[in-house]
Amino acid sequence: MIVATGTTSAGQDCASACRVIVDQLVHDEFVAVLTQEVKGLTTGAPDDPTVFFGPLNSAAQLSRVQDHLRNLPSHAQVVTGGETLPVHGYFHQPTVVTGLRQEDRAVQEEIFGPVITVQPSSSDEEALRLANGVRYGLASSVWTRDHRRAMTMARKIDAGCVWINCHIPVAAEMPHGGFKHSGYGKDLSAYSLEDYTRIKHVMTYLGS
């Protein structure tokens, strides 16, 4: 699910699962499994039913993704991918990056490409600090068998959407929208109507 929702549409979905924070006790095992899954993805022409995702939407966006990867700090590691494809079009390999620190550009900015970054955390509190320590807050997901833990994390994550043990299912009756630099207001649900209304307050005093 993380691989699929982190790379679908070449990572150009505003709710992509592009930044993963995982318990340091299982970090290496998680990265190994994630890398094998990502290596199995294919990219190519969007009308080819055998590929998982198509190209980036422009030469400028392809260049932006490559700029992020070329300028990674020395402590970061591209585990798999990281390159454009030597074919006509704006195709980029699915990519996994580890070793990033919270202040790094690839964490603080949205790459909007088929790039998944992985950061370890030593506790739920650190995971929350890392999750909330960016300017954006549109979508997130919590993965755990402990429902009480999931609900605590969901309450404390500063994002407009929190999914538990899933990512990106959208229902018409649920509001969809972000916090902080991820915009204001909601689409879907009754909350979306607020952007189309003009509320007027009229009060009169009739006297005694």
Image (cartoon, grey):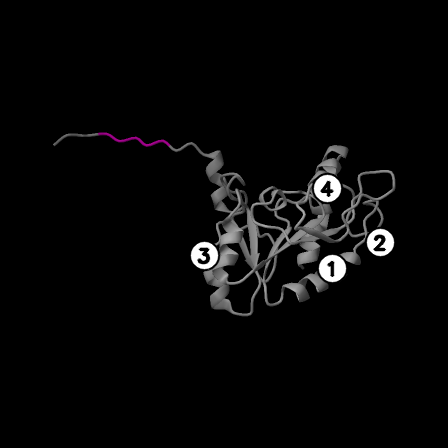
The residue positioned 46% from the left and 38% from the top of the image is: 194
Mark in front: 3 vs 2: 3
Q: Is residue 160 left or right of residue 26?
A: left
Circle nearer the N terminus (4, 1) = 1
| Residue highlighted by disc 4 | 70
The residue positioned 14% from the left and 30% from the top of the image is: 207
Which structural element holds mark 2? loop
Structural distance between the alpha carbons of marks 3 and 4: 36 Å
Mark in front: 4 vs 1: 4
Give the main secondary structure, helix, strand or loop, of the magenta stretch: loop
| Residue highlighted by disc 2 | 50
What residue type is disc 2 on? Thr
- Residue 118 makes an appearance in the image: yes
**Residue situated furthest bottom in the rendering:** 145
Mark in front: 2 vs 4: 4
| Residue highlighted by disc 3 | 155
Quadrant where the N terminus is found in the figure: bottom right
Q: Nearer the viewer, residue 112 or 32?
A: 32
Which structural element holds mark 1? helix
